[in-house]
Image (cartoon, rainbow, N blue to C red):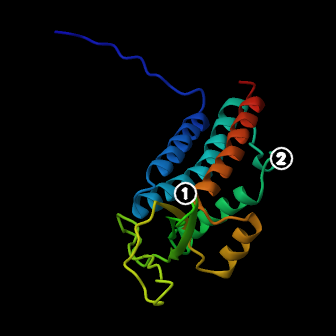
Amino acid sequence: MLSVRCQAVTSPTNASLVFADLRDALQALEAARGSPKDVRRAFSQFVDLTQRLTSAMRTDFSRLKSARWDAAAFPGWNKVTDFFKWLRNQDQHELPIRISVHERHFYAVPGHPGRLFPFDGTWTLADQLADAPPQGITFHPIDPTTGRHLDPVPPVRVEYQYLVQLHSEAVRKRLHAIGTTDVHQLSAACFAALSEYHDYFLAKLGI
């Protein structure tokens, strides 16, 4: 009979494990760009992990230092991290996170090789479980002689942005103060702050 002994491999702290999950969640959010449903779910998971990070720090600090973790003492909190804290409470106690899709088409400029002009619009998704971005934006050039619409022209490329849905005045004000509604930009900015927060935590532990 073959006997195998397995030694448990543990993270130095629970907080470091949650932070690794947070980093993976950010990567999953980036990889989900092709599907509104997957973006919303990955974003929701990322939002949830931002709060779990502090919870793990409280547990670790109490266990390792026999003291209370003072999250408020971290100097790196900002409008983005405050928004994620607010959004998590909204998601859990008020309305689930909802997203919209901003679609931008780029078309070639006739007679100007290499030049493109954009044409865009935002879909306020009614179906938050949609596997693919909505379709329907078309560009019909006009015949300069007759003034009639010609057949639609295919875009050179199409880009999608996923936005936090502005369902209330409260979320409008918070995101206006930040300057973006893009879930990927918001998450990247939040992760940058929480990366510093994690380093700050480890320094307080002397790790």
Residue closer to the observer: 177 or 12: 177
Inter-mark Cα distance, 2 to 1: 50 Å
Quadrant including the C terminus: top right
Q: How crowded is mark 1: few (under 14 residues within 10 Å), some or many (20 or more)?
A: few
Question: What's the residue type where badge 1 is placed?
Answer: Pro
Report the side of 139 relative to 51 (left or right): left
Asked whether 100 or 117 is in front, the reply is 117
Image coordinates for residue 83, horizontal then vertical, percent: 69, 63
Residue 203 in the image, given as x and y percentages of width and height: 76, 30
Looking at marks 2 and 1 on the same chain, the residue that comes earlier in the sequence is marked by 2
Given this view, does label 2 or label 1 mark the residue nearer the observer?
1
Percent from the top left, x then y, of residue 39? 46, 58
As shown in the figure, which amino acid type bears the numbered disc 2?
Answer: Pro
Q: Mark 1 points at which residue?
A: 113
Q: Are marks 2 and 1 in contact (CB under 8 Å)?
A: no
Viewed as shown, does residue 50 lie left or right of 79?
left
Question: Looking at the rendering, which quadrant does residue 56 occupy?
Answer: top right
Q: How many discs appear?
A: 2
- Residue at left 54%, top 72%? 119
Judging by the rendered image, the residue that carries numbered circle 2 is 75
Q: Residue 82 carries which label?
A: none
User: In the image as oriented, which residue stretches furthest toward the left?
Assistant: 1
Mark 1 lies on a secondary structure that is loop
Q: Is residue 9 above or below residue 124?
A: above
Compared to residue 10, the image places residue 78 above or below, namely: below
Q: Nearer the viewer, residue 70 or 39?
A: 39
Residue situated in front as seen by the camera: 139 or 9? 139
Q: In what quadrant of the picture does the N terminus appear? A: top left
User: Which residue is rendered at x = 44% and y = 79% of the image?
Assistant: 140
How packed mark 2 is, by other alpha carbons closer than 10 Å (few <14, some 14-19, many 20 or more), is few
